[in-house]
Image: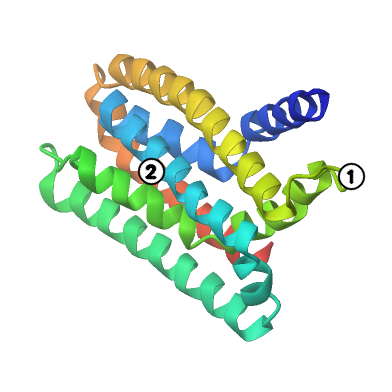
């Protein structure tokens, strides 16, 4: 039990550390409100279920052992984020002042894809989860990895929900200013570009 408490503490600290995912959820909340921020956050966290299964089965390690496959995912993921940035700016330019607001389903799906197409997440799961596997336990390593991954995902849902609610509250206040409201889509696009550069360079 102590091992799992240590894991949850480490997971919470890592989840809450400033990073591209949290920045994007904050940006979406400020731009399009609490509902879209929560959908984006929950989509990102849901992608972790796939990474958990892949790590437990050894699929992630097998795939990322091939450099060309890893590079291909990086390029595809970064290109997808740049495409989203383009769509965000295009919508702001063409539809201003009635900028199109994404649906909950669309925002959720984009969150899932952003998580799955970021190879850094897969690398993180491969590097982080095994540190908390008990080699002396009678429980098999894949089961332990799956359990740890699920715990990480669930605590991520909790913290990202709070971030989504907080960003939605900020967004409601910012939306009162027409000038600020007009600039928010460009801020979201800028965050997407930064995340894509992070994926390529890191």
Residue lying at the far bottom in this picture: please name it.
68
The quarter in which the N terminus is drawn is top right
Label 2 crowd bin: few (<14), some (14–19), many (20+), radius 10 Å: many
Q: Nearer the viewer, residue 152 or 100?
A: 152
Label 1 crowd bin: few (<14), some (14–19), many (20+), radius 10 Å: few
Q: Which mark is residue 158?
A: none
Q: Distance from label 1 to label 2 (Cα)? A: 35 Å
Q: Which mark is residue 43?
A: 2
Q: Is residue 94 left or right of residue 84?
A: left
Q: Is residue 120 above or below residue 130?
A: below
Q: Residue 135, percent across and down?
A: 87, 48
Identify the residue at horizontal 67%, vertical 55% (top origin): 142
Identify the residue at horizontal 67%, vertical 52% (top origin): 125
Q: Is residue 151 above or below residue 108?
A: above
Residue lying at the far right in this picture: please name it.
136
Q: Nearer the viewer, mark 1 or mark 2?
A: 1
Q: Which residue is mark 1?
A: 136
The quarter in which the C terminus is drawn is bottom right
Q: Residue 31, percent across and down?
A: 31, 33
Q: Residue 162, percent across and down?
A: 47, 20
Q: Quadrant of residue 187?
A: top left
Q: Is residue 152 above or below residue 77?
A: above
Of label 1 and label 2, which has the lower sequence position?
Answer: 2
Q: Is residue 113 left or right of residue 55?
A: left
In terms of secondary structure, where does tag 2 sit? helix
In terms of secondary structure, where does tag 1 sit? loop
Q: Quadrant of residue 180?
A: top left
Identify the residue at horizontal 75%, vertical 48% (top origin): 128
């Amino acid at each position: 039990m102590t091992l799992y408490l240590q894991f949850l503490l480490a997971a919470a600290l890592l989840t809450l550390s400033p990073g591209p995912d949290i920045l994007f959820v904050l940006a979406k909340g400020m731009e399009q409100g609490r509902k879209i921020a929560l959908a984006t956050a929950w989509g990102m966290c849901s992608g972790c279920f796939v990474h958990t299964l892949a790590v437990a089965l050894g699929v992630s390690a097998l795939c990322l052992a091939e450099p060309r496959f890893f590079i291909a995912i990086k390029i595809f993921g970064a290109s997808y984020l740049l495409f989203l940035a383009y769509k965000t700016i295009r919508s702001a330019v063409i539809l201003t002042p009635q900028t199109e607001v994404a649906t909950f389903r669309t925002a959720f799906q984009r969150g899932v894809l952003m998580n799955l197409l970021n190879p850094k997440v897969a690398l993180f799961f491969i590097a982080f989860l095994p540190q908390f596997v008990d080699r002396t336990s009678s429980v098999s390593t894949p089961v332990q990895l799956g359990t740890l991954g699920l715990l990480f995902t669930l605590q991520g849902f909790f913290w990202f929900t709070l971030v989504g609610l907080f960003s939605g509250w900020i967004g409601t206040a910012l939306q009162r200013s027409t000038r600020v409201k007009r600039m928010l889509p460009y801020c979201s696009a800028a965050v997407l570009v930064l995340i894509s550069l992070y994926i390529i360079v890191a």
